[in-house]
Image: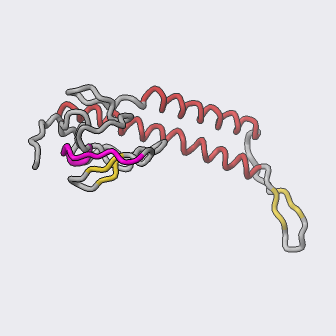
Amino acid sequence: MSVPHLDLRDQFQPIAQEFRRRRRLILFIGIPALMGLFALGMAGSETRSRSGQVHPATINLPFSPALLFGGFALGVMAVLLASLTWGNILKCPRCQVNLDTTQKFNFCPVCGEDRVEKRMLLMGSVCRACNTNLYRGRHRRSYRIRYCPGCSVLLDEAGIR
């Protein structure tokens, strides 16, 4: 049986846009930091020729590897700080449940139905209405949030990943 859902997409849209913008910014900071780590690893590596001679891989950097490592460390710290301070902005405008960290599902965040069953330990939950596995790993969810899992309000048509 389908439950009529309250539609708060207009109220949730600025929250979803800010969440997406912050996520892109974290990626924008994190990818160059990882590239810096790769370049640092390449700077100290060695190669072997077919004759078995060891040759240092030479990368002519216009700056020292210590500066590169320092920049990478600052990038990692910036990503960690950004993810810690910006991570908890996804809240339902109606019931104020934290959509990003909740593990208790009164309603399915994908379809909004109240047919969510808890499975065994560490296996998450499953919605029997849409057959979606509701599992949250260390860094990602296995589902998109379209409805609030606390009050079944429609929040985002496309869904927040």
Residue at 73% x, 43% y is: 62
Where does the image place residue 151, in percent across and percent down from the top left?
A: 20, 33
Q: Quadrant of the C terminus?
A: top left
> From the viewer's perspective, is residue 97 above or below residue 5?
above
Residue at 33% x, 30% y is: 98
Q: Nearer the viewer, residue 10 or 136?
A: 136
Residue 120 left/right relative to 9: right
Where does the image place residue 64, in percent across and percent down from the top left?
A: 76, 39
Residue 21 left/right relative to 138: left
> From the viewer's perspective, is residue 88 above or below residue 21?
above
Q: Nearer the viewer, residue 147 or 122?
A: 122
Residue 136 left/right relative to 75: left
> From the viewer's perspective, is residue 7 above or below residue 50?
above
Residue at 31% x, 47% y is: 144
Count of numbered marks: 0
Check residue 139 for magenta coloring.
no
Residue 126 left/right relative to 112: right
Q: Nearer the viewer, residue 104 or 65?
A: 104
The chosen color scheme is secondary structure
**Residue 22 picture quarter:** top left
Check residue 110 for magenta coloring.
yes
Outermost residue, front side: 120
**Residue 66 picture quarter:** top right
Outermost residue, bottom side: 50
Residue at 25% x, 44% y is: 108
Please provide the residue range marked out in magenta: 109-120
Magenta residues, dominant SS class:
loop
Where does the image place residue 134, in percent across and percent down from the top left?
A: 34, 47
